[in-house]
Amino acid sequence: MSESSLWSLLLVTAVAAAAPIISRMVPGRPPQVLFLIVGGVVIGPHVLGFADSSEIQLVAGLGLGFLFLLAGYELEPGLRRERAGRQALIAWVISAVAAVVIVGGLEYLGFVRAFVPVSIALTTTALGTLLPILREQHMLAGALGRFVFAAGAVGELFPILATSLFLGAYRTWWEALIIASIGGLAFVLVWLTRLISGTRVAAIITENRHATSQSTLRITIVLLVGLLLITERFGVEAALGAFFAGMVLRSTSTGSGREFDDKLDAVGYGFFIPVFFVSSGMALDVLSIVENPGRLLVFFLLLVVVRGLPALLVYRRNLAVRERVQMMLLTATTLPLLVALSAIGLESGVMLPENAAALVGAGVLSVAVFPLIAIRLQRPATALHPRQ
C-alpha cells in the first residue's frame, strides 16, 4: 500500500471516528451517516483535496458489501408470507410503475437519458443505511418497525435483482443464468452447513468462536469476499452476492445469537461501512451540483413521489396517519444503490454527468433529511409512554 493510500485511509478513519461524537453534540442528534458523508465531501478532491476515493476503493467496496450483507442477515425468510411482506411488495410494484411512467416522460423531454438506471434508482430503499439509525432510536419494535423492515427489504432486494438483470448480466442467456446460480450457491451453502452440523468440524468452529481464531467471523468474511468475487467476475452487481451472503448467514445461524450479531456489527459498522459512506462523500461532485441545483431538487422530490407516496395508500388500514408519513419518509431514504447505478450509467455513457451527481446528491440529502424528520415524528409517541 502506497503512502498516499495510507494517508487517505488515515483521514477517512479520522472522519469515521469523529462522526458519532459530532452527531451526539449537535442538537437533535442527526444521523451520523450525514457527518460521514459531509466529512468525505470536505476532505475529498472537490473541496480540500486532502484525500482521493480511488486510494481506498477496495476497503470502500468491502464496506458496501458489508452494508448489504447485514441487510440480508436481518431479513427473516418468513417475512414475505406475512401481511407486511405482501404490502411491501405491492407498494414497490406501484413505485416501479410510477418510475417507468415519470422517467419515461422526463426522457421524452430530454431531462434524462439513462431511462433504466434512473427508473430503478427511484424504487430503492436503503435498508442497510436505515437499520443502525432506527435501531438507535428503538423504532424497529412494534408494527411500524415490522412494516418498515419489510418495505426496506423489498426496496433493496428487488432493485438489486433489476440492476443485475437489466444492467449487468443481460447480454446472453448464460450470463443471466449466473444470477440464479448465485442464489443456488447460497442454498448449497445452507445445505452444507446443516450437513456438517453435529460433526467434529462443527464442534471445532463452535469452540473457537470466542477464541483468537474467531472461526465463525472468519468464515463469514470468506463467504462475503467469495460471493463478491463471483459477482464481480461475471458482471453481476456485487450487492446481490453480499445480500445473498447475509441470507445464508441468517439461515445457518445455530444459536450464537446476539454475540455473533455484535461481532458483525463491530466489523461492519466499526470499520468497513463508515469507510464506504466517507468514500461516497469524497466522490460526490459538489461543483456539478452547485452548477445544477435544480436537478438535485427534482430527483429529491421524485424519491418522495415515486418511492414514498405509495406508503400513504398501501398502509392506510394498518397504520395511523403519523406512522404512514414516517413510512413515506423512511422508504424514500436511499443512497448505496444510487451510487452504484450512477457509476453504471456513467461507465456505459448513457447517463449525463450532471444527472449522476444530482442523483447521488439527492440520495445524500434523503439520508440527511428523511430519517431525521421520521425520528422527530416518533418522539411525541415516546413521550406519552415513557416506560415502554
Image (cartoon, rainbow, N blue to C red):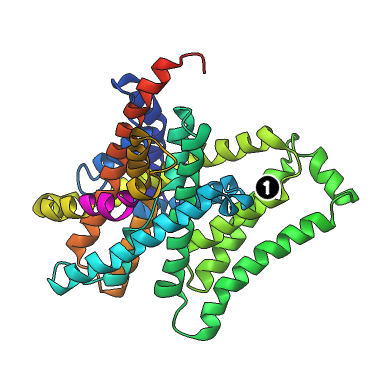
Q: Secondary structure at mark 1?
A: helix
Residue 27 located left or right of residue 227: left
Q: Is residue 304 magenta?
A: yes
Write down the quadrant of residue 321 in the picture. top left
Q: Is residue 17 left or right of residue 222?
A: left
Q: Is residue 158 visible?
A: yes
Residue ranking furthest to the front: 317
Residue 3, image x, y percentages: 40, 47
Q: Mark 1: give few (<14), some (14-19) or many (20+) Cα within 10 Å.
A: few
> Pointer 1: what residue?
218
Q: Is residue 336 above or below residue 145?
A: below
Relative height, residue 273 to residue 347 (above, below): above
Name the image quarter holding residue 295.
Answer: bottom left
Residue at the (16%, 50%) spot, across then down: 297
- Indicate whether 78 appears above or below 320: below
Residue at 24%, 50% in the rendered image: 362
Q: Position of residue 323 (x, y in %)?
A: 38, 35
Name the amino acid, label 1: Arg
Picture quarter containing residue 356? bottom left
Task: Pick the residue in front: 364 or 211.
Answer: 364
Picture residue at 63% right of the left edge, 52% below the top: 77
Q: Residue at x 57, y 45 (%)?
A: 74
Q: Return the x and y of residue 175 as percentages of the image width and height.
A: 52, 80
Can see residue 58? no
Q: Which portion, as a residue range, is magenta?
A: 300-310
Task: Please name the predominant secondary structure of the magenta segment in the image.
Answer: helix
Left or right of 277: which side holds 386? Answer: right
Relative vertical location of residue 42 with respect to residue 306 in this rendering, above or below: above
97 or 237: which is nearer to us?
97
Residue 251, image x, y percentages: 69, 51
Q: Residue furthest bottom?
A: 172
Is residue 121 inside the magenta stretch? no
